Each structure stands twice: as structure tokens, then as C-alpha cells.
Amino acid sequence: MQSQTIAQVLTAVGRNVAPVDAQMLLQHVLNVNRTFLLTHPEHVLTSQQAATFLKLIQQRIEGWPVAYLIGKREFYDLIFDVSEAVLIPRPETELLVEWALELIPDNKPSNILELGVGSGAIAITIAKHRPQAHVAGVDLSVDALAVARQNAIKLQADNINWVAGSWFDELSDRKFDLIVSNPPYVAENDAHLQQGDLRFEPQVALSAGLHGLACIMHIIRLAPQYLSDAGWLLLEHGYDQAAECRRLLEERDFSNICSHPDLAGIMRVSGGQWNARADCNRFKPQ
Ligand code: GLN
């Protein structure tokens, strides 16, 4: 095969794959940054590189998410390894992290719990930004926990303890100042599960019962047992679940309940405070 340049292989891809996806795949194959790619159109690929790139483009055309093909995804201010064992971190989930960071003090220790860590993106970002916090990260999937552990090692987040188990099952009588979760929340017959990236992601991390609320209901019901006084529960949920989440929190006697919109203006995270009256100022947003 005749040797090809960066400009030639990108042109050959044409409209079959979004240019930004093709560029990310080529960056991955050549192990270069985007600037190199854009400023060295005449750079020649080895035949091995050209073949690998072509294979990745083929997989992308079949629908494989770019994050799985290159094995990583940026989230907040860090880059996480991902595999098919974990959900690909989403930009809307950064909102959950932002809210958690607003609530977690940066000048004293606190106990934080993440339920359903997947790649570990939420737990690790919190742990890195709040080095005094003790973070516990739970996941049912040992394969997901292996990815999360690996990410924590790579990103040098050593204030996290990983727990294999279902939701609260392995936490005995521990108490937390803040519990955060992006649980599965897509309704099991939702057509989106058959579309785009979701087709390739672990269904156990995505769908939860007929209305998608099974896990959210379970977490809200049990959380008070594991929250310190004035502790917070923050949850990501589906585009149409904010009112129901707030109702469930209210029914379980949480206070200071509120929801926040994502960048698309969709109410995407909701949360509330447990036993807030006992110690109003201890763990409240500024
Ligand atoms: N936000 C994801 C999606 O709908 C779902 C993630 C989840 O179920 N926690 O694409």
C-alpha cells in the first residue's frame, strides 16, 4: 500500500465519520495532540498506523463510541480510562460534581460516599479536589471497580476506599456527610437504549425498572440511615424525573430540597439535606 499523509487519511474518511471523531481516533493512533495533527498535514503514517486507523474508523461507522475505541474520556479537569465495563462519563454529570464540591469543605475532613462509581470519575474528581475528604466508592461490578481503582492509581487519588457491593449493602453502620450518585435511571423500554453510544454501554449502569426510578427510590429510601445530621444526598436523574425525585425526597423527610439544570437547561440533578435542623450551618452551601 502506498504511504499516506495525515491530510490524505482524513480526507479519505470523508463524511463517513464526524471530523472531530476522526481526528480523535487519528490522534490516538499516532499518539499526538490535536495541534500536531492540524499543523502537520504532510506527516506520513506507517502502514501499520494507517491500517489501525482504518479499522477504528470502521468500528466508529458501526457505532462504537469514540471513548471505548481510544479507551479514555475527559471529565471535569481529568482524563479517565474507560472500558466497556463502565458508563462513559457525561458532561452533565460534571454538574453533580460541582454541586458536591460546593458542599464539601476544603479545610477540614469529611466523609463522602459515591454509589455506583463506574469509571470512578465522580469519586476521583471529588477526592482530588478535596484532599482532606475520605471518599468511599461502591460498585456492584468488579470489572468496573478494577477500572476505577486503576484510574485512582493513575491520577494519584489515594483518599478513596473502594467497596464491592450493591448500594448500601456493605457499608454496615458507617455515616457520611454527603452521598452522591449517578445511578441507572433510564426506563427499561426507553428507545434511547437502542440508539447511539447507549447500545454499547453496560445496561446494568443505564436502565432501572419500568420507569427508570427503581434505583433512585432505593437510594432515597435507605440514605437517611447512612447520613450524618445535616448531610446531603445528591442524585443525577433523567430529563423528566426531577419533580418525582423531589417528591420522593420530601416524602422521606429531606429538607432544603432543590434541583439544578444542566447546560441544556434540563433539570438533571436533585438533592436534599437530612436532619438539617440538628446542625444547620455545618454542611451547608455558602
Ligand atoms: N445520562 C445517560 C444517558 O441518558 C444515562 C446515565 C444513567 O443512567 N445514569 O445517556
Image (cartoon, helix red, strand yellow):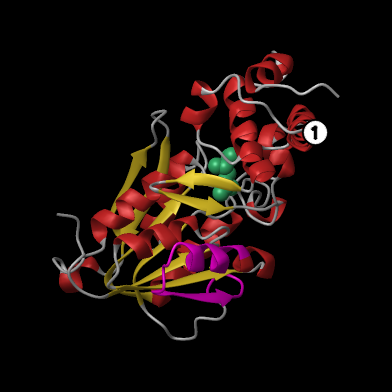
Judged from the image, the quadrant occupied by ligand 1 is top right
Q: Position of residue 54 (x, y in %)?
A: 78, 29
Q: Residues within 10 Å of mark 1 (few under 14, many from 20)?
A: some
Residue 187 can be seen in this image: no
Q: Residue at x 61, y 28 (%)?
A: 21
**Which element is circle 1 on?**
helix
Q: 250 and 84: which one is in front?
A: 84
Query: Which residue matches tag 1?
Result: 51
Indicate left or right for 162 with 77 as reference: right
Q: Quadrant of the N terminus?
A: top right
Mark 1: amino acid: Ala
The correct choice, above or below, for 237 with respect to 105 in the image is above
Q: Position of residue 49 (x, y in %)?
A: 73, 36
Q: Residue at x 67, y 52 (%)?
A: 209
Q: Picture quarter containing residue 109? A: bottom left
Q: Picture quarter containing residue 32? A: top right
Q: Residue at x 64, y 69 (%)?
A: 140
The correct choice, above or below, for 249 with respect to 158 in the image is above
Residue 148 on the magenta span: yes
The correct choice, above or below, for 282 with respect to 263 in the image is below
Q: 44 and 22: which one is in front?
A: 44
The correct choice, above or below, for 227 with respect to 260 in the image is below
Q: 259 and 105: which one is in front?
A: 105
Q: Position of residue 246 (x, y in %)?
A: 39, 49
Q: Quadrant of the C terminus?
A: bottom left
Residue 261 can be seen in this image: yes
Residue 90 on the magenta span: no
The magenta-colored residue range is: 147-168
Residue at the far right in the pictured view: 1
Residue at the far bottom in the pictured view: 173
Indicate left or right for 286 with 144 as reference: left
